Image (tube, rainbow, N blue to C red):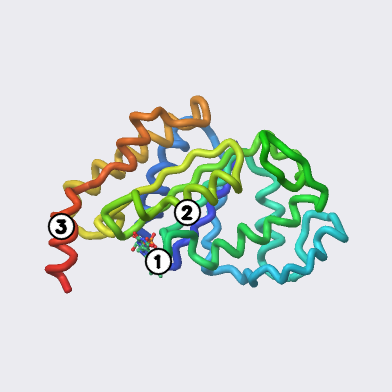
């Protein structure tokens, strides 16, 4: 498989990337995959200007000359794209949202209705493209937290697997290794599982998305530390 990892954390030691790296280690066990990791924060990616210049030229490129066109060239060629980013204000951090906005050149202006949902007709055949979204967050709950992102991902991506993980700051706290290490090991196993059918079982997903420590204990620890 050709795999692109878009790392959307701005941090050097990303909580979310600890999980994504483990998932990728699991993927690697299943074959000789070609894996490219792009640290989005290190790239020059301006916000979309909304000019639709890309739809006039129809070459799969954006008229803004920055690092996004190299990402588009990679993206259109992939079997799997893994979007890895922390939850910010119930959605994607702005710098990786800019990457998503600027995938518009890979579509045409022409529209079609698929399963009652209007979409732009892709410029390239994406039928083989699969998407995994891995997002970590600082609150100890998924409900009242991940819903907007969940919906955005459902509407934006096909062949999608979403993994939304609460309490991810624990992953970089040495004292929490006793709960973080089993979570990381579960992500590694999930990477292996995923390649069998481009999906994860409900029980695997439940395991990946479960709390590492009870909500009240998590809040007590956070509040005690500030
Ligand atoms: C600007 C900002 C907004 C955030 N918004 C949320 C949020 O809406 N919900 C949440 O649970 N955590 C939120 N967080 C916490 C991060 O998601 C959390 O710290 C995560 O573990 C960081 O992951 P990373 O190390 O991969 O960047 C926010 C953090 C920042 C800096």
Image: 217 above or below 80: below
Q: SS at mark 1?
A: loop
Question: Among all residues in the image, which is located at the extreme top?
Answer: 196
Q: Nearer the viewer, residue 132 or 173?
A: 132
Residue furthest front as drawn = 116
| Residue drawn at x 79%, y 46% as measured from the top left | 111
Of marks 2 and 3, which one's residue comes earlier in the chain? 2
Q: Nearer the viewer, residue 90 or 33?
A: 90
- Residue 70 vs residue 9: left or right? right
- Residue located 43% across and 31% down the image: 200
**Foreground label between 2 and 3:** 2
User: Sequence-wise, which precedes: disc 3 or disc 1?
Assistant: 1
Neighbours of disc 2 within 10 Å: few (<14), some (14-19), many (20+): few
Residues at marks 2 and 3, CA–CA distance in whole angstroms: 32 Å
- Checking the image for residue 175, the label placed there is 3
Q: Is mark 1 within 8 Å of ligand 1?
A: no
SS class, disc 3? helix
Residue 147: x %, y % from top left: 43, 50
The quadrant of the rendering that contains the C terminus is: bottom left
Residue 101 spot, x, y in % from top left: 64, 60
In front of the other: 146 or 208: 146
Q: Nearer the viewer, mark 1 or mark 2?
A: 2
Q: Quadrant of ligand 1?
A: bottom left
Q: Which residue is mark 1?
A: 12
Q: Does residue 185 appear to the left or right of 196 in the view shown?
A: left
Q: Is residue 29 above or below residue 59?
A: above
């Amino acid at each position: 498989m050709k795999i692109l990892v878009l790392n959307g954390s701005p941090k050097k030691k990303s909580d979310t990337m600890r999980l994504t790296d483990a998932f990728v280690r699991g993927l690697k066990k299943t074959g000789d995959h070609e894996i490219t990791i792009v640290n989005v924060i290190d790239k020059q990616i301006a916000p979309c200007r909304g000019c639709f210049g890309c739809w006039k030229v129809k070459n799969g490129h954006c008229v803004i000359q920055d690092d996004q066109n190299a990402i588009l060239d990679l993206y259109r060629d992939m079997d799997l794209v893994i979007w890895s980013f922390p939850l910010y204000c119930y959605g994607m951090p702005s710098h990786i949202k800019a990457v998503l906005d600027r995938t518009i050149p890979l579509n045409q202006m022409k529209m079609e209705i698929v399963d009652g949902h209007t979409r732009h007709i892709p410029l390239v055949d994406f039928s083989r493209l699969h998407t995994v979204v891995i997002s970590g967050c600082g609150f100890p709950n998924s409900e009242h937290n991940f819903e907007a992102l969940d919906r955005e991902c459902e509407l934006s991506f096909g062949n999608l697997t979403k993994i939304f993980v609460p309490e991810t700051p624990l992953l970089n706290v040495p004292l929490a290794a006793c709960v973080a290490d089993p979570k990381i090991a579960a992500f590694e196993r999930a990477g292996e599982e995923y390649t069998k059918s481009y999906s994860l079982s409900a029980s695997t997903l439940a395991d990946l998305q479960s709390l590492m420590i009870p909500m009240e204990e998590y809040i007590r620890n956070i509040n005690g530390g500030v």
